[in-house]
Amino acid sequence: MRSAGRRHYTSRFPLYLSNMEADLSKQAKAIRIESHGGPEVLKLTTVDVAEPGTGEVMIRQKAAGLNFIDIYFRTGLYPHALPHGLGFEAAGDVVAVGEGVTHVKVGDRVAYGQSPIGAYADLRNVPAAKVVKLPDAVSYEDAAAVMLKGLTVQYLFRQCYRLQEGETVLFHAAAGGVGLIACQWAKALGVKLIGTASSAEKCAIAKEHGAWEMIDYSRENVAERVKELTGGAKLPVVYDGVGKDTWMTSLDCLKPRGLMVSFGNASGPVEGVDLALLNNKGSLFVTRPKLADYVPTQQDMQAAADELFGLIVDGRIKVMIGQRFPLQEAAQAQEALAARKTTGATIFTIE
């Protein structure tokens, strides 16, 4: 009886440990803010993560991405109820699934690029509809670096204005995280991308990544240089993620009936748009798009991601991660991004 009792006790002991570990796994480290402001409002905290609800997956994250939109939410430019986390893209492993989830399972490698806010964390729940399967050939870090940025380029180049081989376009901030993907994607499509950057060094990096020509806006007039490069014809489309500082310059680079794609506010939002000005400059079109409207379903998102992943796997897009920070240095990472001291993508490494 004593021997049987020992066997019974030891058979239950691993189950006890397993349950204890499961409880511990619901504690997550996450960056949160309780007020809007500068980088100092970012705090590394411990939060509880509940079991995934219907239509959710729990992801043990390996890496998360940093984007300018994170700063907009930190400062309150894009309002959100406080307190809240930050970040929209990450990659990791599925560790639990909620009811109704069928396209991913526990153990799958996954990534996302437009989740609900809160990607700066080591463990979190995400709506399964926002999650795509990650090919084995694409690393967690590369996925975290390109999901939001790469899907942005996909909708800009393949949906918002479908680029055709032989066209010439302008892309501002071509040495940034989105820009370097855009340079490579344009080259893969046979498109001549004219990029802008703030220094000779950044111009060189963008050209190494496939830009046809670069304009150093710190010493060159962008609109005049575009006219020179196009023989006075100017451009059918301009992609502008900078915003206020480049708005007028971008309009001056467009040919009649050209399209101005204003997809970001790195220098501040564009305000006071004058419709008569669009008429005077050649019946120009303007759009202010966002990713969610171009990948409204999980199937749409997976299709866009598959196109992106395919270009990465075959080597036509090489992911450039210029900076890596641990989560606890989120403030320093955002400061570097805001000061335009970064090149390529910036990620948070998560152990």
Image (cartoon, grey):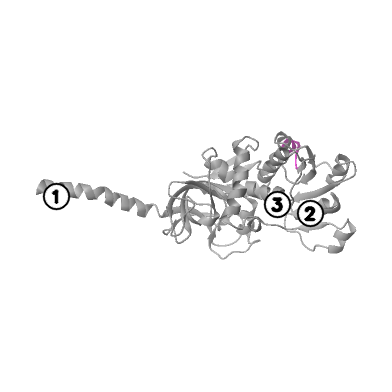
Q: Position of residue 310 (x, y in %)?
A: 61, 40
Residue 321 seen in this snapshot: no
Name the residue type under label 1.
Gly
Residue name at image x 65 percent, y 52 percent:
68
Q: Earlier in the sequence, mark 3 or mark 1?
A: 1
Instruction: Indicate which disc residue 5 carries.
Output: 1
Task: Give yes or no for residue 200 being in the magenta stretch.
Answer: yes
* Region of the chain picked out in magenta, as a range: 197-203
Q: Position of residue 40 (x, y in %)?
A: 57, 54
Mark 1 falls on what kind of element?
helix
Q: CA distance from mark 2 to mark 3?
A: 14 Å
Instruction: Indicate which disc residue 260 carries.
Output: 2
Name the residue type under label 2.
Met
Residue name at image x 83 percent, y 42 percent:
220
Residue name at image x 64 percent, y 61 percent:
78
Q: CA distance from mark 2 to mark 1?
A: 76 Å
Q: Position of residue 25 (x, y in %)?
A: 39, 52
Relative to residue 75, is residue 11 drawn left or right?
Answer: left
Q: Position of residue 89 (x, y in %)?
A: 57, 50
Name the residue type under label 3.
Gln
Relative to residue 300, is residue 63 drawn left or right?
Answer: left
Relative to residue 57, is residue 272 drawn left or right?
Answer: right
* Residue pointed to by mark 3: 159
Please rate how many residues cluster around mark 1, counting C-alpha atoms within 10 Å: few if below 14, some from 14 to 19, many from 20: few
Q: CA distance from mark 3 to mark 1?
A: 67 Å
